[in-house]
Image (cartoon, rainbow, N blue to C red):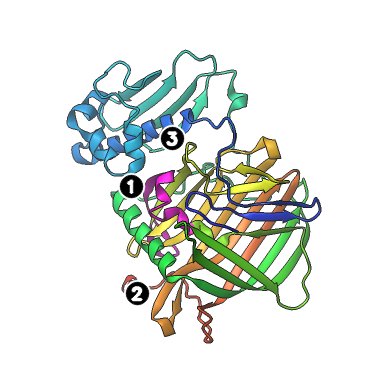
């Protein structure tokens, strides 16, 4: 598996169909649309400006008030994503601030609520985005075009899509998005600098489900796992993963690689390719954490994640949610889904859930946050799979002494020593 900034991949091999897919890609799928995500980011920017305005004035503002107060521009300066959204706004125009779209912003008489809408002009199947004081962003099309909207259809064999519901967060804590992204990027950069090679014991639980969602068969494997991070002469990185079976190996119909790569989404060189917003503060196993939603920009030159089938490469745009420790800015948990199913290859579901834990390498006086468990759910050409990877007994740089995984629920003062 090769990893480049802007091209990270997950690999699979369907042995029953002799297909292999999952190497880096360098181009987008043909016909990738940029209208939706770019205009949706405008709605997110205005909604974020409303939240800040409310904290200061204890009421929401109409659009002209947001412009005159400078709040939209101040909010835009908090992240590169909002700055890109600001380019689509003409703050000098009250009637058509977004070309080709109608912007509506109505505030309730008591100032405690608002309704924000951005709808497309001149199209039969018009796009529209809507938001309110709850912070929820809605997407829709004109009646009669609903069949073209990607629906988040629940199923009985995999977790719900990350957009099926927003996990609750505290509403009384301001979210410093710029600081979170900067500090988290520093932690990921430190991981890249310190992590050249690590090994671990790995257990892989593989389950195949029938079309009725019931389990059909399962296997278990014990593996010796090695991940190696190398810097290429071009300034890009390559992550190689190796597995060797411990004991008798039973070959499952599906294999996958790429678990070690996904925290790199928050690396300073990569984060600009994602639309990232902070949903608020919550707790993860008793640890205060910032809840972040991210979605890959459709116009990124290279996808973070790609798939290859019979020599053809398909970019898979990701969206997801991450929980980042509020004190140490380490990624505690990360979930991803496809932005949309890929009908061309009949890929309906790809859901990944990774939990991280601090690993102390005492001989090196070093602590790194590494994957503790990763659960992958795949719905592909009628096949439904779940694969759970559990890691333990980490070693770094061929260290002889085994290093233990610690649960991520230590007191803040102890967790921040390293």
Report x, y in % for residue 259: 57, 61
Q: Can residue 74 be seen in this view?
A: yes
Report helix, strand or loop for mark 3.
Answer: strand
Q: Can residue 156 be seen in this view?
A: no
The residue drawn where x is 43% and y is 44% is 273
Q: How far apart are marks 1 and 2 (CA)?
A: 30 Å
Please name the residue that numbered disc 1 is placed on.
Answer: 171
For mark 3, does the 10 Å Cα neighbourhood hold few (<14), some (14 to 19), or many (20 or more) residues? some
Instruction: Report the magenta residues as a range.
Output: 263-289
Report x, y in % for residue 231: 47, 63
Q: How far apart are marks 2 and 3 (CA)?
A: 38 Å
Q: Marks 2 and 3: which is nearer the front? A: 2
For mark 2, does the 10 Å Cα neighbourhood hold few (<14), some (14 to 19), or many (20 or more) residues? few
The extreme front residue here reads: 233
Report helix, strand or loop for mark 1.
Answer: loop
Report x, y in % for residue 263: 47, 58
Q: Which of marks 1 and 2 is nearer the N terminus?
A: 1
Front residue (pair 4, 391): 4
Q: Which of marks 2 and 3 is nearer the N terminus?
A: 3
115 up-or-down from 181: above or below: above
Q: Marks 1 and 3: which is nearer the front? A: 3
| Residue 266 in magenta stretch | yes
């Amino acid at each position: 598996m090769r990893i480049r900034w802007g091209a990270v991949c997950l690999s699979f091999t369907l042995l029953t169909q002799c297909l292999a897919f999952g190497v880096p890609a360098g181009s987008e799928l043909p016909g990738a649309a940029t209208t939706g995500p770019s205009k949706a980011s405008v709605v997110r920017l205005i909604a974020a400006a409303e939240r800040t305005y409310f904290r200061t004035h204890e009421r929401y503002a109409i659009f002209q008030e947001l412009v005159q107060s400078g709040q939209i521009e101040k909010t835009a300066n908090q992240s590169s994503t909002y700055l890109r959204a600001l380019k689509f706004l003409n703050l000098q125009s009250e009637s058509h601030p977004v070309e080709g779209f109608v912007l509506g912003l109505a505030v309730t008489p008591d100032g405690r609520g608002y309704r924000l809408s951005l709808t497309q002009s001149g199209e039969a199947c018009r796009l529209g985005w809507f938001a309110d004081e709850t912070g929820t962003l809605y997407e829709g099309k004109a009646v009669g075009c609903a069949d073209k909207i990607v629906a988040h259809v629940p199923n009985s064999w995999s977790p719900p899509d990350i957009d099926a519901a927003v996990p609750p967060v505290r509403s009384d804590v301001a979210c410093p998005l710029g600081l979170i992204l900067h500090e988290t990027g520093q932690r990921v950069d430190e991981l890249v600098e310190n992590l050249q090679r690590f090994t671990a014991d790995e257990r892989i639980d593989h389950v195949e489900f029938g079309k009725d969602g019931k389990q059909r068969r399962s296997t278990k494997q014990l593996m010796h796992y090695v991940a190696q991070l190398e810097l290429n002469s071009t300034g890009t990185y390559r992550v190689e993963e190796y597995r060797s079976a411990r004991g008798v190996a039973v070959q499952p119909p599906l294999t996958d690689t790429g678990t070690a790569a996904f925290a790199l989404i928050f690396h300073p060189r990569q984060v600009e390719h994602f639309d990232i917003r902070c949903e608020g503060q919550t707790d993860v196993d008793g640890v205060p954490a910032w809840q972040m939603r991210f979605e890959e920009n459709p116009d990124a030159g290279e996808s973070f994640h790609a798939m290859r089938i019979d020599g053809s490469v398909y970019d898979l745009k990701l969206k997801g949610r991450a929980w980042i420790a509020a004190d140490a800015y380490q990624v505690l948990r990360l979930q991803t889904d496809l932005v949309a199913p890929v009908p061309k290859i009949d890929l309906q579901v790809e859901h990944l859930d990774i939990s991280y834990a601090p690993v102390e390498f005492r001989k090196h006086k070093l602590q790194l946050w590494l994957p503790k468990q990763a659960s992958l759910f795949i719905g592909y050409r009628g096949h439904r799979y779940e694969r759970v990877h559990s890691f333990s007994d980490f070693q770094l740089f061929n260290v002889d002494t085994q290093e233990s995984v610690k649960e991520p629920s230590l007191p803040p003062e102890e967790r921040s020593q390293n």
